[in-house]
């Protein structure tokens, strides 16, 4: 087996979304024990001009699902982006993992040179190839937001460690 | 061109080490303007039980250089780990980028199934394949530490943005 567009993306996303799910489980237990309001926890951020925890989790799932959809040609996964509880964010992660698992390796492999045009919320349109989107945009952003979600929760004092971040590869 | 062990690692490491270098440049200018002691800045951390900024930068360079050396068979890059200034950390990043650039694509491609045994400082030894080391350990750790270095600096109030984190691909 050689590395491929599929092997460097879908199983990696699933592994670290599993990790994020564990991190959120520990945050939920911690919030109950400390009588912390979940909405307040989900609004924590490292800096006033950075996304809060809820948006870090949303961004992580979006980068994973959107590139999977754009490479495979599958209809993109849509969410209302109105989660206010950890259970709702865990549900979003579960739906994202289900979506990623529904994509076949053959639908993603060989998409290195696929032309992909993305219009961002700002109205700006950018042209990508499958490879430039995955390696130069989606993977770094996915890791950025999973790590920052972890960092916010860790800074709050929840007992999590690197092993939680690393997650478990899909079976 | 299909994705390969080289294309998903060496150029990615160089791109984000360039990003980390820019982030450190902005942190250095900010420290001068605010009369902040660089040693104090490098000792900032998100939580008392996480690495400080200097160690986040060291870990990022180590994960990149070590997997590049282990895949290619090139002698590993060694540092004294005694940096106390931003200039010294930038020098470490520059030496890591030079090392990564000295590795040929042909030395890394095709190493998916290469047996790699690593003995950690704890004394524990783990067996990897080239692919399991790169995708399951080195890349997530590299992104974890570059992101957390960025997060620490951003939380300090340095004006940096995602564009700085994203860096520039190698020319």
Image (cartoon, coloured by chain):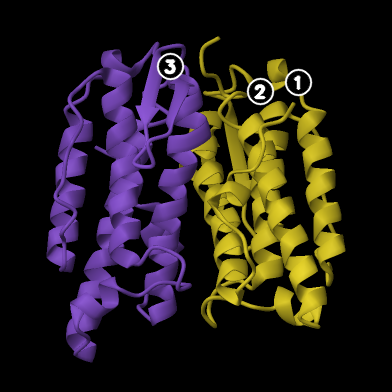
Chain colours: A purple, B yellow
A111, above or below A147, in the image: above
In terms of depth relative to the viewer, which is nearer, B64 or A50? A50
Q: Chain of mark 1?
A: B
Residue visible at 55% across and 65% down in the picture: B151
Q: Which mark is residue B120?
A: none
Question: Quick check: can you spot residue A45?
Answer: yes
Residue A154 in picture, x, y percent from top left: 41, 73
Which residue is denoted by mark 1 in the rendering?
B104
Q: Examine the image and state in which quarter residue B77 appears.
A: top right
Give the structural element (helix, strand or loop) at label 2.
helix
Q: Which mark is residue B108?
A: 2
Query: Is the Cβ of the residue at disc 1 closer than 8 Å to that at disc 2?
Result: yes
* Quadrant of the frame with the N terminus of chain B: top right
Query: Is the Cβ of the residue at disc 3 closer than 8 Å to that at disc 2?
Result: no
The span from disc 1 to disc 3 (Cα, nearest Å) is 21 Å
A69, above or below B70, in the image: above
Number of other residues with Cα within 10 Å of mark 1, as a class: few under 14, some 14 to 19, many 20 or more: few
In terms of depth relative to the viewer, which is nearer, A128 or A87? A128
Residue visible at 72% across and 52% down in the picture: B22
Work out which residue is located at the far front of the displayed protein and give it: A123
Which residue is denoted by mark 3 in the rendering?
A1
Q: Examine the image and state in which quarter residue B8 appears.
A: top right
The span from disc 3 to disc 2 (Cα, nearest Å) is 15 Å
Residue B84 in picture, x, y percent from top left: 83, 72
Q: Examine the image and state in which quarter residue B111 appears.
A: top right
Residue A73 in picture, x, y percent from top left: 25, 18
Give the structural element (helix, strand or loop) at label 1.
loop
The span from disc 1 to disc 2 (Cα, nearest Å) is 7 Å
Give the structural element (helix, strand or loop) at label 3.
loop
Same chain check for tags 1 and 2: yes
């Amino acid at each position: 087996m050689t590395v491929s567009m599929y092997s460097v993306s879908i199983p990696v996303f699933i592994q670290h979304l599993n990790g994020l799910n564990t991190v959120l489980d520990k945050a939920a237990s911690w919030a109950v024990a400390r009588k912390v309001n979940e909405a307040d926890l989900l609004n924590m951020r490292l800096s006033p001009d950075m996304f809060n925890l809820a948006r870090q989790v949303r961004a992580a799932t979006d980068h994973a699902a959107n590139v999977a959809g754009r490479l495979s040609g599958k209809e993109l996964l849509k969410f209302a982006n109105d989660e206010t509880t950890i259970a709702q964010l865990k549900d979003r992660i579960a739906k994202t993992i289900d979506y990623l698992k529904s994509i076949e390796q053959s639908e993603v492999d060989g998409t290195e040179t696929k032309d992909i045009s993305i219009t961002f919320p700002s109205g700006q349109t950018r042209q990508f190839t499958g490879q430039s989107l995955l390696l130069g945009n989606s993977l770094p952003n996915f890791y950025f937001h999973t790590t920052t979600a972890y960092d916010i929760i860790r800074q709050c004092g929840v007992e999590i460690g690197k092993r939680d971040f690393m997650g478990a590869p899909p079976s």
